[in-house]
Image: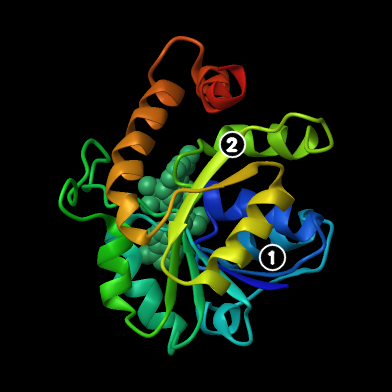
Amino acid sequence: MRIGILGSGLMGGKLGTLFARAGHEVVFSYARSRKKLTRLAREAHGNARAGTPAEAAQDADAVLLAVHWSRVRDVLKQAGNLSGKVIISCSLPMNADDTALVIAQRSSGAEALARMVRKSHVVAAFSTVPSEVLFGVFKSRRKRTRPSLVYCGDNTRAKQIAARLIRDVGFDPVDAGPLRIARYTEPFALLMAQLAYEGEGGAELAYRFERFRERT
Ligand SMILES: NC(=O)c1ccc[n+]([C@@H]2O[C@H](COP(=O)([O-])OP(=O)(O)OC[C@H]3O[C@@H](n4cnc5c(N)ncnc54)[C@H](OP(=O)(O)O)[C@@H]3O)[C@@H](O)[C@H]2O)c1
């Protein structure tokens, strides 16, 4: 598939690299320097290149939205017409200093995003995983047991694309249902981040937590 990366930081940079290594065509976009995008494309060792958000979105089978919540409108504007596109979003609706969700309980960032891009198909995925574990999960992808990763969305084709990408990265995709389920998974993602970045044991603890389903 052709995947456009909108936001090439910790999540977008790593996921784009892994999508390219899994055989997809990837366009990295939206970082503060073009040099960084070019380096990411070169180091992906696959079919990857640097581009603008509009180039990343053009002809893409799916775009990955991986920017801070405060940058969502800007990157969408730069991407241009996303009508009919599949948008896989890992972006959480966080405040400026990343200490709290600004949308929760009765809605979610994913649902707010779907309202911003009404003619696109939003799938919420990858927000529950700390970026630190992604390469390790990919490396272990041929093992019999894989960590689970939940995703949700309202469009069947978009969810199939997301499930394939989740599988390609090395996770076992778990369909959590319609997009409104994101209002339950997003606070959970915050807990995961807290475990990963602030707790004893760090990312490893979060990774083990994801395997909970297999251990019970
Ligand atoms: N990191 C995680 O483990 C994690 C886990 C789950 C969910 N998330 C969510 O995923 C989303 C992305 O997180 P992240 O950690 O990947 O963030 P990040 O590392 O800060 O990446 C954001 C990207 O946006 C780019 N950017 C920011 N301001 C820009 C501007 N003015 N012009 C152009 N590009 C700009 C950054 O450029 P530079 O590369 O130049 O900085 C970077 O490439 C967030 O919504 C976060 O809540 C993150």
Placement of 212 over or under 15, stated as above or below: above
Name the image quarter holding the C terminus: top right
- Circle number at residue 148: 2
Front in this rendered view, residue 205 or 7: 205
Q: Position of residue 60 (x, y in %)?
A: 62, 80
Q: Residue at x 28, y 76 (%)?
A: 116
Q: Quadrant of the N terminus?
A: bottom right
**Is 112 left or right of 62, judged from the image as shown?**
left
Element type at mark 1: helix
Task: Using a 10 Å C-alpha cutoff, classify the residue at mark 2 as few (fewer than 14 neighbours), some (14 to 19) or many (20 or more).
Answer: many
Which colour scheme appears in the figure?
Answer: rainbow
* Vertical order, 183 against 98 (above or below): below
Residue 38: image tag: 1
**Amino acid, disc 2:** Ser
The amino acid type found where label 1 is placed reads Thr
Q: Where 62 sits versus 36, above or below?
A: below
Q: Position of residue 57 (x, y in %)?
A: 55, 81
| Mark in the foreground, 2 or 1 | 2
Pick the residue in front: 206 or 123: 123
Distance (Cα) linking label 2 and label 1 = 32 Å
Earlier residue among tags 2 and 1: 1
With 196 as the anchor, is 93 left or right in this view?
A: left
Place of residue 123 in the rendered image (x, y in percent of width and height, measured from the top left): 46, 63
Side of 143 relative to 205 (left or right): right
